Structure formats: structure tokens, C-alpha cells
Image (cartoon, rainbow, N blue to C red):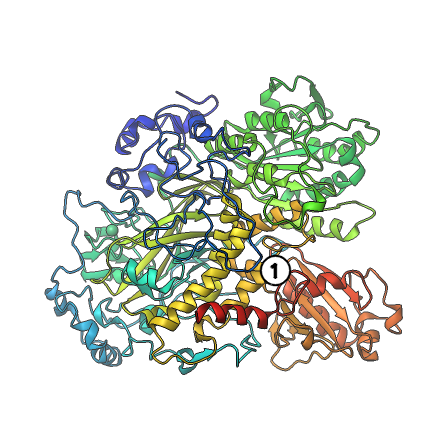
């Protein structure tokens, strides 16, 4: 079945489709996407035994058939909460997926933060296995179906070489290079490791002299509003020495002895209660030989919950810690090596891109670090364009950079790269006009029209709607924009489709005309209805031929036509954690999102509404189309000026940031590991291929993994993400990140390498799913049990002497604190504070934000700022940015004679004590005394004083590092906003939540049971 308006992908060459193993899916434009032939080997897809979609339109992908009529709520397909579990894709062709949703979710009224008695496990990806942990825990090992191992098939023409193939001949290549390197190899690993498999070594000891490569480092155009990261970690040219990747890659102290001694410490949290470092918490460094580690991927881009991978699932199960990856794959980078080469070297078997962690058997052969197949080095690769030397493939930039971008040749396209297409869909009902948002948005668009990423092919269009749908013809040559009204919202059609999306360059004046007049056009409207659903259908039809980005602005609950919604929030039931509507009330938005995804359209939703608007339902339009959700509660152009400022700043970033179109992302990992659940905004197209019609630099993703096959024969595993996209300039590009981690055999080593932030971030993602598939209280219990279980495992299996107290490995010293912070986070908190849409928005943020921002909204940073000094300050482009110490989140840390800034991610709160020093009041706030601090105060005056300069420099620096705009509130002690400030004091008790110390006692009780 062919898709209307989808000429190109459907027209894929037959051989591509035939290769797919899902050849029958021809015509379905996103069965495997434009990447099909490129990123995924045909054998892999076959071997995965995955149920591909039957031929036909993707409407069958929508799990309408898995809709459970028995369920009172709209538990369609089950994917709305379930992170798109891999081997239960929302594909109706696999009806045997009762796990998805087997009816109304069992719920039990559970006391908050109490370990409950048995709770029937809802369906979902955390189904308990046979050896049942306490109920409502997460069982991290995933029920294996055997279908999702992500390694390469064995049925390749040339049998892949397994890890323990004797490669003794390799040793002849161990060069006599750098003696210091040699020495470090020689002292090498513990006997336990080397003896384990003496035959096995994938090492090649190249130690060629290092030459600084001089390949091109391009600086991607930086979007305004968000300077690219200053990190230069994986990006700059690096001196390179190919190091042996084998038994002797680890430092002498395999048992973690090479860690800083502090890292080996066992901490009694009941005695040491202030474990929060005064500087930002750094991710743990994998216990690898420094020559490997220095090539490793930057943890800001690619990070694992366990930096030491347990060698078996049994060991992982013992640790009771989740195994998963957190990714920020399209992050803005200062420097990014870009390779233009006729040959992109990839493993013939598993299609892994050549990377720093492969090994060269000799100059002509390299061994894949994911599937161990030995591949030939292509002739072109022998020449290093950087050094202009022939015969040093190991020095190519591809082998020296864990993060790299390739210009993709034509075989990575199923259709010519499409032009950038931007369609704006505006709510112009009475309610919308009241908020005054159109003025701001149109002005922002006018200001940034020339900065929209694109080229001479860029297209733009506009739709407005209330009870009817309005199109705007912007055909070049018209004297003014022409409005076309379609009032039939039952069967929407597109009038003059060819003139509605126009070339921006050619029709710029008409576009500017429209943007100038649009805010005035509806000021007298009395139309209160909102036909959002039909408007989205129209927009989808308009964009189908090309794909692109749809930006939807909505200010109320849609009331007319398809997708209309009814209010569901009952404010007096907000406190009840079990009966709240976290799941969509209709599958309309998800279905439409999947349609959009199929035609390479992503939908970004801007919700500007003071009333309940059922974000749980509306948000699906973005979630499954790989869009983003922005939420401005109580937006009003006069009454809420800070929201106006926030929208203005965020639109500037939104409109000008980098964008990738027609994107797909695949994550591969070393044979034996398996990826099973994905978190983020996308649609899972096939086992491990994420469909991302748009990709933006501010989106984060997470995946869960399991150990499918024992890793006892290997000492290193690697993970590789490959993001194939069309740039706004029309180039096809592939951004590749590769992370390498050691494999360990003891529980202690697993614990020593735990990354507590990544673990907390992954647990938060899992808890959002659990909230939707089961209940909020179930999710909260699972969070608490995650701490109890892992610390119990540590106590019973690692600690030899059973000391009293709450003993934790140093790596997990902040685990209870972060989980307590999650319980108090807007997504998961109890109590009457969280409005439903705000809670849903917080959950969307958990799923879609990079880890660094998620941690900040969960556990804010608190600083004292009335005594900022230049000591330890950063110097950034002539500005001195103070770096005050981070304080614990407790009122004990406050004092009335000071001023304290809390950075909670999207909001900054500056609390000023009653007796705050006069100096701060006059030199920073510009007021005579405490009483004259205006309320509300949302801006600091720029005064000509060093104190003012320091404070403003610090606040600007915090803001500059994130893609959204945190509002600043200056709070006096008697301000109503003080409650918000105190709400974030994670270590203190609140009306509905334990203090940190009480929480520790609770954990200790459970652990010592
Ligand atoms: Zn391979």
C-alpha cells in the first residue's frame, strides 16, 4: 500500500527492501527508514527474529488492536508509559503481547514511602521473574525472548571470529614502541584476568610514535541563545597511540585499586550525613588504561549507569542496580571532527562504524569490537589524509575520536534530502487572543526569520484555527497574504496546497507582512471553540510530501472535532497518588503522531494555558513524533511578564538552534549485551532503530540493557550510537559516539563503578513508565525499593563484617539522597501542590531532558551569594564568574544575614534573609533596605559595583549553559514564593515527605532486616 504524498521512501529500490528481511514492508516508509540499507545489515534484521510490520500503511502500527476494551481507561497499546519496550513494540502484528496491557492496572492504596506488602505487578517491562524480589521492585533483568540480542548474526558468509579465537600471531605486532607504554602493559592485569583465558587477546600493541593529526575540525554554527558547550573532550585533535585492547588493557589494580582511595571507602551514611560535594558532582571515570580512557566518549554525551559492566546477568541481578545508557547525542559541540570520505569503514557483519576501540591485527585487517569479526581495511583507508602518510590506518581520525561525524554518501539516502520545512500552527480562539501570545511569537519569528536553520530551499507556512481552519497563501507575486478559511472540520482538505508552504527567500516579504498583521487579525474574535485536532490533520496533510517541523501553539483544551477533550482534573483529589489521570484519554494524538513520524514530520507543542488542558493527551503528539513539549502555565502578556520573557528567550533558542531532519538513531553494543527499553521522544521503528523525524540538540535519551550472554571471554565492551540525519543545509550526515567500558567479575567492582547520577536518571525514566502502567504510588515504592535492594545486596554480598549503621559504597553515597529528591520532584511528589498538567510536564521533562538538567530539577544546587568572591572563579571571555560552593538542601544551611540562590534548573530562586547585609541590598539588589525589595522581583539591576557584576555574571553563566530560560525570582522571607523555595529543600521534612535523616533510617531498617 502506498502512502499518499510519500513518494520517495516508498520508491526505495527493490533490492533495499529485499535485503531487509521485512521486504514485505515495502511501501511502508518507515519500516526501517532511509537508514535501512545503511545502518543496519540485512542479516541483523533477519537474525533478530523480529516481527516486522506486515505490508501496508503504518496505521496498523498503531496498537489499536491491543487496545483493551475492558480497560476503563485508554490504555492503548500500552506504550504511552512504557518507554516503547523493544520486544513488545506497538505493532499489532504481534498480538501475543499481553504484557503490554492486560486490562485495568491493579492498584493498591499504598502508604507513601512505605515498603508495601505484595502489590500485583502490572504489566510492563519490569515483570518480576521467577526469583521474585520484593514486590514493586524493578527487576532489571529483562525477560529474554531471545529475539533482541543486538549482536551480529552468525550466519554471515564469513563466520565471525569469536572473542577467544587464538590470535597469538597478533603478538608479533606488539611493537617496541614507547617503553613506558610497554611497561604499563607488562605489569598489566591481575592473574585472575590473564589466566582466565590465556589464549584470548584481542590486543595489538601498536605504539607508533604519535603525530598530532591535523584533520579538519569544523565548528558547527552556534545557535543564538545557547552557546555550545565549552567542553573539548572528545573533539579536539588528540595525540594518538593505538593501545592494545585486550587482557592487559586494565591498570594493575583490576579490583578498583587504581581508583582514588576515597572511592574505595565504605561510608556509614548515618554518621556522615553531609556527603554532597561542594563542587558539581563529576561522573566516575571508567577503570580503564589511560590510553584507552583518553579516547573515550565524553560522559556528557554518552554515559552508562555502571562504568564497570558485570560479566553476567546473574552478577547484574545480584547488584540490583539498573544497567542502561544515557545519551545526549546531538548536543552542541565546540569542535567536532567531520570526515568526508568516499568510504565509511564499517564492520561487514554488524555494521559498527570503525572507532578507537577496534583492534588492528595488522595494517590490513581490523577486528570489530562489537561482534569480533575481522574486517579488511579498505585501500582508501590506508592513506591518512591528515598526515599524508600511507599505511597508518590506525591514525585516521575515525580511529582517534570517540565522537565523529561523517558526510554520508548517497547510499545513505532513500530519497534526496528534503528542504527544511517549517510550519506554524496557531490557536487564534478568544482564549488565545486574550493571552496575547501571538504578538510575542510573531515578533520572535520576525526577529529570527533570517536565522532559521536552512538554505535557499527553506520552506515556511502558517495555519491558524479556532472553530475553523485558516490557511494563508503566500505565493510569490501576491500583493498581500491571502487567507483561506476551511469550515468543514469533519473532513479537512487543503485548499491550494502548492501555495501554502512557500520558499522563504522568495516570499519573505509576504511572510513578514503576515507576521505583522496576524496578531491584530483576531483581536475582536468571540470564537471560543478550539478545533485543534482537525487543524493538526490539515497541517499533517500539508507537510506529508516533504516532512519537516510543525510548531503548534495551543492555549486551551481542544473542544471541537476529532481529538476534542474533556476536563479530567479534580483539584481536590490531587493529593491522592493513585487516581490521577496520567495516561491519555484518547489515542488520537498518538495515532496522528505516528502518521507524522511516518512522513518525517515532528510536532513541537507549545502549551500556554492557565487552565487544565490535558497535557497527558496532547503531549502524545510530540512524544511519538520526536518533538518537544513547552509549557507556559498562566501565560499572559500583561499579568505574567516573566512568562513572556521566558517564552521570548526560549523561542529564540528554538527557532535558531541546529536541527536535523529525517533522522534515525541506532544504538549498538558488544555481543552479549542487549538493549531492550528506550526512553525519550521518538518512535521505535524496529528492534533498535529509533525514528526521529527531527532531532534537536537539547534532547536526551535513555536505554535499558541486560546481559544476554556471559561476557566472561571479554574484558571490554563498547556501545555505539549512530545518528543519521539531514542537516538544514541538505547534507546527509552521521554522528557517531562510541563508549568503551571494562567488564568485571565481582560484585564489589560493579558497585565501585556505579554512576549514581546516571542510575538516578534511568530510575526516574523507569518510574515515569511505572506511574503510567501502574500507579504513582507503585512508582514511588519502586524507587525506594531500588535503594533498599541495592544497599541490601551490598551489605550482604560485599561487606564482610556486618557493622551497624547504613553502609554504602562511596560511589552510591548520594543514592538515597537522589532518590529522596526524586520522590519530592514534581513528577512523583504527593500532596496537593502539583497540578496535573504540571506533573505531566515534569514527567515529559524526565523523559526528554539530558541527564544534567534532569539532575538539576531533581536535586537543585544551592549557593550562598551575598559574599561572592573571585577566589576560584572561572574566567570566561573577559568575565569573571564566581564559583561559590554548593550547599546541602536544608534550611540549616540558610542564615538570616545572607542571601541564597537556588538553581532548580528551569527556575532560579534568590532568597534574601531578613537581616541580609546592607551591602548586598544596595550593591546588588539596588534597594535601600530589606523592606523595599519589591515583590515580585524577577530581575537584578545592573549596578556599577563589583558585587553586582559578580552576582550577575554568576546568574548569567548558569543561564547560558542551558537551552531553556530559567526565570529568576527574588524572594523575601514573607513572600508566598518562599514555600516553593522550601519545597526544594530536599533534606528537610515536608508535610507529606520524610526528611533525609528519616529516610535514611527507613532505608537502614529495611536493609538490616
Ligand atoms: Zn562487527
- The x and y percentages for residue 929 are 88, 74
Q: Judge the density around disc 1: few (<14), some (14-19), many (≥20) Cα neighbours within 10 Å.
A: many
- The x and y percentages for residue 263 are 42, 78
Is residue 233 left or right of 710 when viewed as pictured? right
Is residue 100 left or right of 393 when viewed as pictured? right
Name which residue lies at 81% across and 80% down: 917
- The x and y percentages for residue 706 are 33, 54
Name which residue lies at 27% across and 79% down: 252
Residue 54: quadrant of the picture: top left
Please determine whether, in this image, residue 223 is positioned above or below residue 67: below
Q: Can the viewer see residue 457 in this picture?
A: no
Please determine whether, in this image, residue 733 is positioned above or below residue 464: below
- The x and y percentages for residue 136 are 46, 53
Please determine whether, in this image, residue 297 is positioned above or below residue 17: below
Q: Can the viewer see residue 915 in this picture?
A: yes
Of 271 and 250, which appears nearest the observer?
A: 271
Is residue 161 left or right of 803 when viewed as pictured? left
Name which residue lies at 65% across and 57% down: 906
Count of marks placed on residues? 1
**To which residue does mark 1 refer?**
824
Of 693 and 429, which appears nearest the observer?
A: 429
Please determine whether, in this image, residue 873 is positioned above or below residue 485: below
Q: Quadrant of the N terminus?
A: top left
Residue 146: quadrant of the picture: top left
Q: Secondary structure at mark 1?
A: helix
Of 500 and 126, which appears nearest the observer?
A: 126
Ligand 1 near label 1 (Cβ, under 8 Å)?
no
Q: Quadrant of the C terminus?
A: bottom left
Residue 243: quadrant of the picture: bottom left
Is residue 146 left or right of 896 when viewed as pictured? left
Name which residue lies at 70% across and 30% down: 510
Amino acid at each position: 500500500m502506498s502512502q499518499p504524498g510519500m513518494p520517495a521512501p516508498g520508491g526505495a529500490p527493490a533490492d533495499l527492501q529485499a535485503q531487509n528481511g521485512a521486504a514485505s514492508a515495502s511501501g511502508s516508509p518507515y519500516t526501517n527508514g532511509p537508514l535501512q540499507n545503511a545502518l543496519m545489515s540485512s542479516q541483523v534484521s533477519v537474525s533478530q527474529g523480529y516481527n516486522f510490520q506486515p505490508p501496508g500503511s503504518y496505521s496498523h502500527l498503531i496498537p489499536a488492536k491491543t487496545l483493551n476494551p475492558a480497560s476503563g481507561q485508554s490504555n492503548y497499546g500500552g506504550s504511552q508509559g512504557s518507554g516503547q519496550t523493544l520486544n513488545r513494540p506497538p505493532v499489532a502484528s504481534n498480538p501475543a503481547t499481553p504484557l503490554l496491557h492486560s486490562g485495568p492496572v491493579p492498584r493498591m492504596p499504598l502508604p507513601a514511602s512505605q515498603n508495601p506488602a505484595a502489590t500485583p505487578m502490572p504489566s510492563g517491562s519490569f515483570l518480576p521473574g521467577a526469583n521474585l524480589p520484593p514486590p514493586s521492585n524493578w527487576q532489571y533483568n529483562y525477560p529474554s525472548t531471545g529475539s533482541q540480542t543486538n549482536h551480529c548474526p552468525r550466519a554471515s558468509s564469513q563466520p565471525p571470529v569469536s572473542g577467544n579465537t587464538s590470535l597469538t600471531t597478533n603478538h608479533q605486532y606488539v611493537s617496541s614502541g614507547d617503553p613506558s607504554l610497554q611497561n604499563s602493559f607488562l605489569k598489566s592485569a591481575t592473574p585472575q584476568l590473564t589466566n582466565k583465558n590465556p589464549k584470548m587477546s584481542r590486543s595489538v600493541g601498536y605504539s607508533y610514535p604519535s603525530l598530532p593529526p591535523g584533520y579538519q575540525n569544523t565548528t558547527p554554527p552556534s545557535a543564538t541563545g545557547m552557546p555550545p558547550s565549552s567542553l573539548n573532550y572528545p573533539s579536539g585533535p588528540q595525540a594518538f597511540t593505538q593501545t592494545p585492547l585486550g587482557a592487559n588493557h586494565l591498570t594493575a589494580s583490576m579490583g578498583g585499586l587504581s581508583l582514588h582511595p576515597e572511592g574505595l571507602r565504605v561510608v556509614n551514611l548515618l554518621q556522615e550525613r553531609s556527603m554532597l560535594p561542594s563542587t558539581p558532582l563529576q561522573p566516575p571515570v571508567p577503570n580503564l588504561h589511560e590510553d584507552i580512557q583518553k579516547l573515550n566518549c565524553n560522559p556528557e554525551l554518552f554515559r552508562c549507569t555502571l562504568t564497570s559492566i558485570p560479566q553476567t546477568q546473574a552478577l547484574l541481578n545480584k547488584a540490583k542496580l539498573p544497567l542502561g545508557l544515557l545519551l545526549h547525542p546531538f548536543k552542541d559541540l565546540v569542535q567536532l571532527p567531520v570526515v568526508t570520505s568516499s568510504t565509511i569503514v564499517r564492520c561487514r557483519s554488524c555494521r559498527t562504524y570503525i572507532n578507537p576501540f577496534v583492534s588492528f591485527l595488522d595494517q590490513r585487517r581490523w577486528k570489530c569490537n562489537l561482534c569480533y569479526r575481522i574486517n579488511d581495511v579498505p585501500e582508501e583507508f590506508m592513506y591518512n589524509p591528515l598526515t599524508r602518510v600511507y599505511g597508518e590506518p590506525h591514525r585516521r581520525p575515525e580511529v582517534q575520536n570517540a565522537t565523529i561525524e561523517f558526510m554520508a554518501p548517497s547510499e545513505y539516502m532513500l530519497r534526496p534530502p528534503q528542504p527544511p520545512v517549517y510550519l506554524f500552527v496557531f490557536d487564534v480562539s478568544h482564549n488565545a487572543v486574550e493571552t496575547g501570545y501571538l504578538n510575542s511569537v510573531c515578533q520572535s519569528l520576525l526577529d529570527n526569520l533570517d536565522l532559521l536553520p536552512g538554505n535557499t530551499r527553506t520552506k515556511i507556512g502558517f495555519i491558524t484555527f479556532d472553530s475553523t481552519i485558516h490557511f494563508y497563501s503566500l505565493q510569490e507575486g501576491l500583493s498581500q497574504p491571502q487567507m483561506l478559511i476551511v469550515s468543514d472540520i469533519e473532513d479537512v482538505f487543503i485548499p491550494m496546497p502548492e501555495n501554502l508552504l512557500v520558499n522563504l527567500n522568495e516570499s519573505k516579504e509576504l511572510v513578514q507582512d503576515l507576521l505583522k498583521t496576524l496578531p491584530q487579525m483576531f483581536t475582536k474574535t468571540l470564537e471560543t471553540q478550539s478545533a485543534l485536532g482537525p487543524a493538526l490533520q490539515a497541517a499533517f496533510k500539508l507537510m506529508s510530501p516533504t516532512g519537516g517541523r510543525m510548531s503548534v501553539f495551543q492555549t486551551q483544551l481542544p473542544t471541537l472535532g476529532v481529538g476534542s477533550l474533556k476536563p479530567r482534573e479534580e483539584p481536590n483529589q490531587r493529593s491522592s497518588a493513585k487516581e490521577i489521570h496520567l495516561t491519555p484519554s484518547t489515542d488520537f494524538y498518538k495515532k496522528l503522531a505516528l502518521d507524522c513520524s511516518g512522513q518525517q514530520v515532528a510536532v513541537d507543542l507549545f502549551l500556554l494555558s492557565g487552565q487544565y488542558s490535558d497535557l497527558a493527551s496532547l503531549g502524545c503528539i510530540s512524544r511519538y513524533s520526536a518533538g518537544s513539549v513547552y509549557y507556559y502555565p498562566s501565560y499572559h502578556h500583561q499579568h505574567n511578564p516573566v512568562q513572556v520573557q521566558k517564552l521570548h528567550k526560549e523561542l529564540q533558542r528554538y527557532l535558531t538552534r541546529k536541527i536535523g531532519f529525517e533522522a534515525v538513531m541506532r544504538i549498538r553494543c558488544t555481543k552479549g549485551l542487549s538493549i531492550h527499553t528506550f526512553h525519550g521522544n521518538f518512535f521505535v521503528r524496529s528492534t533498535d532503530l529509533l525514528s526521529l523525524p527531527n532531532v534537536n540538540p537539547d534532547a536526551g535519551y535513555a536505554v535499558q540493557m541486560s546481559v544476554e550472554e556471559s561476557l566472561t571471554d571479554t574484558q571490554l565492551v563498547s556501545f555505539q550510537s549512530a545518528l543519521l540525519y539531514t542537516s538544514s543545509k541538505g547534507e546527509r550526515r552521521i554522528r557517531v559516539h562510541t563508549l568503551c567500558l571494562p567488564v568485571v567479575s565481582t560484585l564489589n567492582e560493579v558497585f565501585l563503578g556505579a554512576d549514581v547520577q546516571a542510575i538516578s536518571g534511568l530510575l526516574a525514566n523507569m518510574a515515569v513508565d511505572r506511574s503510567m502502567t501502574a500507579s504513582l504510588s507503585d512508582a514511588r515504592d519502586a524507587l525506594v525499593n531500588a535503594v533498599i535492594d541495592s544497599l541490601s545486596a551490598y551489605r550482604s554480598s560485599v561487606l564482610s563484617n556486618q557493622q551497624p549503621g547504613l553502609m554504602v559504597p562511596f560511589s552510591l553515597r548520594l543514592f538515597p539522597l537522589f532518590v529522596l529528591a526524586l520522590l519530592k520532584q514534581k513528577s512523583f511528589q504527593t500532596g496537593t501542590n502539583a497540578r496535573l498538567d504540571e506533573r505531566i510536564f515534569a514527567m515529559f521533562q524526565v523523559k526528554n531532558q539530558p541527564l544534567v538538567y534532569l539532575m538539576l530539577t531533581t536535586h537543585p544546587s544551592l549557593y550562598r551569594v551575598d559574599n561572592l568572591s573571585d577566589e576560584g572563579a572561572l574566567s570566561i571571555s573577559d568575565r569573571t564568574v564566581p564559583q561559590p560552593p554548593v550547599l546541602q538542601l536544608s534550611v540549616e544551611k540558610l542564615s538570616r544575614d545572607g542571601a541564597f540562590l537556588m538553581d532548580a534548573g528551569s527556575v532560579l530562586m534568590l532568597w534574601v534573609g531578613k537581616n541580609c547585609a546592607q551591602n548586598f541590598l544596595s550593591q546588588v539588589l539596588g534597594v535601600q533596605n530589606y523592606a523595599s525589595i519589591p515583590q515580585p522581583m524577577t530581575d537584578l539591576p545592573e549596578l556599577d559595583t563589583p558585587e553586582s557584576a559578580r552576582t550577575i555574571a554568576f546568574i548569567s553563566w548558569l543561564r547560558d549553559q542551558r537551552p531553556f530560560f530559567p526565570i529568576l525570582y527574588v524572594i523575601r522571607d514573607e513572600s508566598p514564593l518562599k514555600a516553593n523555595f522550601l519545597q526544594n529543600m530536599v533534606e528537610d521534612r515536608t508535610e507529606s515527605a520524610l526528611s533525609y535523616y528519616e529516610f535514611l533510617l527507613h532505608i537502614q531498617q529495611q536493609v538490616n532486616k
